Amino acid sequence: MSKLNELAVAVESGNVADVVALTKAALEEGVAPLDVLNTGLVEPINVLGEKFRLGQVYVPELLVASKAMKMGVEVVKPLLVDGGAEAKGKAIFATVAGDMHDIGKNLVVLLLESAGFEVTDLGMDVEVDDIVDAVQDDPDVQIVGLSAMLTTTMYAMKETIEALEEAGLRDKVKVIIGGAPVNADFASEIGADGYSANAPLAVELAKKLLNA
């Protein structure tokens, strides 16, 4: 079994010590940091997420695995983020009000930073007014990223876009959305500038929107 496969198994089982050790071992063997992140750490969480959707695993297993994955990400992160890179753009990201899921958002933020973007992460369960205030407070912000994992919270994205319009800020930023319950059609419906199904595609979308 390859180190990445071993790492994926350790993530799924939620074994923090093994995840940290195997992440380091894979990197020492010369596996590319992005491959360690995507294949060894992110993919098993995606697999668990699908099992959760099908009722094959439950919240406790998902939480334990997510914690283990985050510890592995902390090992990889310094190798992904290039502090010397010229900033390609400035972004604000948030999980919308009422939603406490942040794994996907955190991965997008990590990969955007590694691609040279300056990102302010407002966190989870962020109220519409707080997102608008953050855009208003920083005239250099070019992208607003909104994440939702619940059908009950996805319409907070629409409310955020409407609030940006009312504040006269909509024309200065590109709004991108992501998360399990949303898609490109929903993005178009609510007036977002784009939708991404995963973190690497979100980076490509951000670059495309800013011509970066």
Image: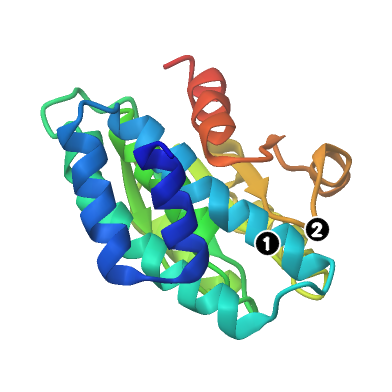
Confirm or deny contact between disc 2 and disc 1 (CB under 8 A).
Answer: no
Coloring applied to the structure:
rainbow
- In percent of width and height, residue 81 lies at 22, 37
Is residue 163 among what the camera can see? no
Q: Quadrant of the N terminus?
A: top left
Q: In this view, does 191 lie above or below 89?
A: below
Crowding at dot 2, Cα within 10 Å, few <14 / some 14-19 / many 20+, comes out as: some
Residue 164 horizontal/vertical position (percent) = 62, 55
* SS class, disc 1: helix
Q: Mark 1 or mark 2, which is nearer the start of the sequence?
A: 1
Q: In front here: 148 or 20?
A: 20
User: Label 1 sits on what residue type?
Assistant: Gly
- 124 left or right, relative to 190: left
Closer to us: 8 or 87? 8
Instruction: Identify the residue position indicated by label 1 in the image.
Output: 49
Amino acid on which disc 2 is placed: Pro
Residue at x 59%, y 50% (from the top left corner): 168
Judge the density around disc 1: few (<14), some (14-19), many (≥20) Cα neighbours within 10 Å: some
Q: Can residue 172 be seen in this view?
A: yes
Residue 209 location (% of width, % of height) = 56, 23
According to the picture, the residue beneath numbered tag 2 turns out to be 181
Q: Is residue 160 left or right of residue 74?
A: right
Distance from the alpha carbon under mark 2 to that under mark 1: 13 Å
Task: Say which residue appears at 52% left-offset and 32% top-offset.
Answer: 200
Q: In the figure, is residue 45 to the left or right of 16?
A: right
Percent from the top left, x then y, of residue 7?
39, 50
